[in-house]
Amino acid sequence: MKARKAFLVLLTAGVVGTAAWLVFLSPVLGVRSIEIVGNLTVPEERIEQQAGVPDLHPLATVNLAEVQGRVLGIRQLAGAKVDRIWPGTLRIEVVEREPVAMIQAGDKYAIVDKHGVVIEIETALPPLLPVLKVDRPAEGDPAMMAALQVIDAVPDEVAAKVRQVRAGTAEGVTLELSDGRTVIWGGTDRPQEKGRILTSLLRREKAAQYDVSSPDVVTLK
C-alpha cells in the first residue's frame, strides 16, 4: 500500500514536472507568431523587431511589461498593449500618434502630435499640416501646449483652412487661414463657444480679422 502511494506521488510529481517544463521551458508552447494590431504607418516588421521576443521563446515567460516598454520606444506610438494568446501567439495592439502640426527648424520640419511629442523629422514641407510658430518650441512649453490645444479644438470646417498658428503666450493664440484671414483665438478657455461662433462668422461675414478671444464680445476688422 505504501509502495503504491509512493508510486502515485512520484507519478504525479513527474506529470507536474513535465507540464511545468512544457509551459515554462520548452519551445513546444513557445512564441510562434507575433500579431500586430492597430498600426497604420509603422511597419509590422519594425514593431516586431522592437518587441525583441525571440522565436519559440516560452510564451508563459515573456515579460509583457518589458515588451510594452520596448515597443513604446518607437516615437510614432502613443500606446501599446501586449497579451498572450495560447498556444503560441503574442498579440501587440498599438495606438499611433496623430500628427497635428509642424515646426520649422532650419531646412527641416518637426512633425508633432497634440502633446508636443516630435513624431518624425521631414526634409520637405508636409502638406495639410499647419505651421506652428512659438518662441520656445519645446514639449511642455505653456505657449506651445496652448497652441496645440487650440489646434485640437478648432472645428473640422475651420481646421482645413488653418495654415499657421502663432502663440507668443498661452493666452495669445492666433490662427492664419489659407485665404489670408486672421483669427485671434486667445487662450484655451471656452473652445466650443469660440469654435461655433467662428464657424458661423466665416460663413456669413467678410473680414480680414476675427477676434473670438472673448466669445461675449466678438469683433471683426
Image (cartoon, helix red, strand yellow):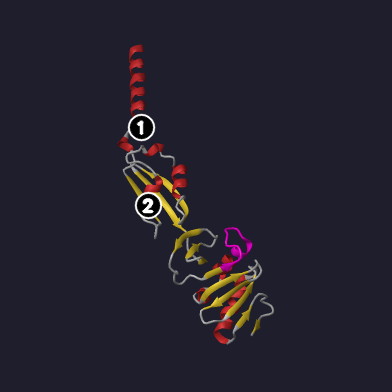
Q: Position of residue 217 (x, y in %)?
A: 69, 79
Relative placement, left or right, of 168 versus 99 is right
Where 188 falls versus 211 (above or below)? above
Which quadrant of the figure contains the C terminus?
Answer: bottom right
- Residue type beneath disc 1: Leu
Which residue range is magenta in the image? 133-146
Badge 2 marks a residue whose secondary structure is: helix
Residue identifier under label 2: 46
Relative placement, left or right, of 140 versus 100 is right
Residue at point 61% right, 60% down? 141
Q: Position of residue 106 (x, y in %)?
A: 50, 65
> Of 13 and 99, which appears nearest the observer?
99
Where 42 falls versus 161 (above or below)? above
- Residue type beneath disc 2: Arg
Q: Position of residue 120 (x, y in %)?
A: 46, 60
Residue identifier under label 1: 25
- Asked whether residue 1 is in view, the answer is no
Q: Is residue 138 magenta?
A: yes
